[in-house]
Amino acid sequence: MMRLLWVLWCFVFVAIGIPAQDSEKKVTNKSELSGTWELLDDESIYTRIGGKSDENYTLQITFSGEEMKIIRTIETDNGKTAYDLLLYTDKRGERNVTPLFDKGIKSCTTWHKNRVERTYRYNASIGRSEISVREEYRVSKDGSRLIVETFRTTDLPRPRDFGRTKLVFERKN
């Protein structure tokens, strides 16, 4: 009888543990992030005053192993700007040159459950404060939207909504 109770008890623990493991293993497939994405201005939240963009903004994302390449293209009345970000999702770190960081910015990129997370720091142009940034890339449940949220923190007094930007992109292919 004791042996039967012990076997039953083990069975209950195994049965409870299997669904928990499956839900923890759900990670966004790299192919879900891959593709060309176009900004949906009406669904995005900006930090600048005025709140909307006068730009056409697209992301093209590709993967090769742990390497995630993002080509950001921004078109305005003044012309077109495109630059690449090369991110490594295995935490090895990377340095990218962008229009804002012409000397390059070091960052670290990792997978966190259903999103890719990139973190970096830079010095503020006003004062001597360091700004910490966390970017999250995740795909909507239906796969039609890419949400890129950026969170900024600093010890300087900051304008309202300085800390968060949410860009929503629609899949184009």
Image: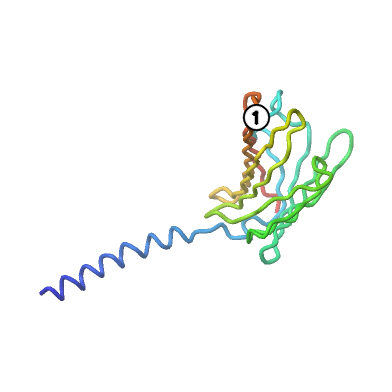
Q: In the shown orientation, is residue 1 left or right of residue 142?
A: left
Residue closest to the far left:
1
Residue 12's quadrant in the figure?
A: bottom left
**The N terminus sits in image quarter:** bottom left
Tell me residue 148's x, y (percent).
Answer: 64, 44
Instruction: Name the residue rendered at 80%, 43% in the picture.
Output: 101
Residue 147's quadrant in the figure?
A: top right
Q: Foreground residue, 72 or 1?
A: 1
Tell me residue 70's x, y (percent).
Answer: 74, 53
Q: Mark 1 packing: few (<14 Cα in 10 Å), some, or many (20+)? A: some
What count of labels does the image hold? Answer: 1
Q: Foreground residue, 34 or 11?
A: 11
Instruction: Name the residue rendered at 66%, 63% in the picture.
Output: 66
Q: Amino acid at mark 1?
A: Phe
Query: How does the figure colour the protein chain or chains?
Result: rainbow
Tell me residue 143's x, y (percent).
Answer: 59, 51
Residue closest to the far right:
78
Instruction: Name the residue rendered at 75%, 28% in the picture.
Output: 126
**The C terminus sits in image quarter:** bottom right
**Numbered disc 1: secondary structure:** loop
State whether residue 139 is above or below residue 150: below
The residue identified by callout 1 is 162
Instruction: Name the residue rendered at 61%, 50% in the picture.
Output: 117
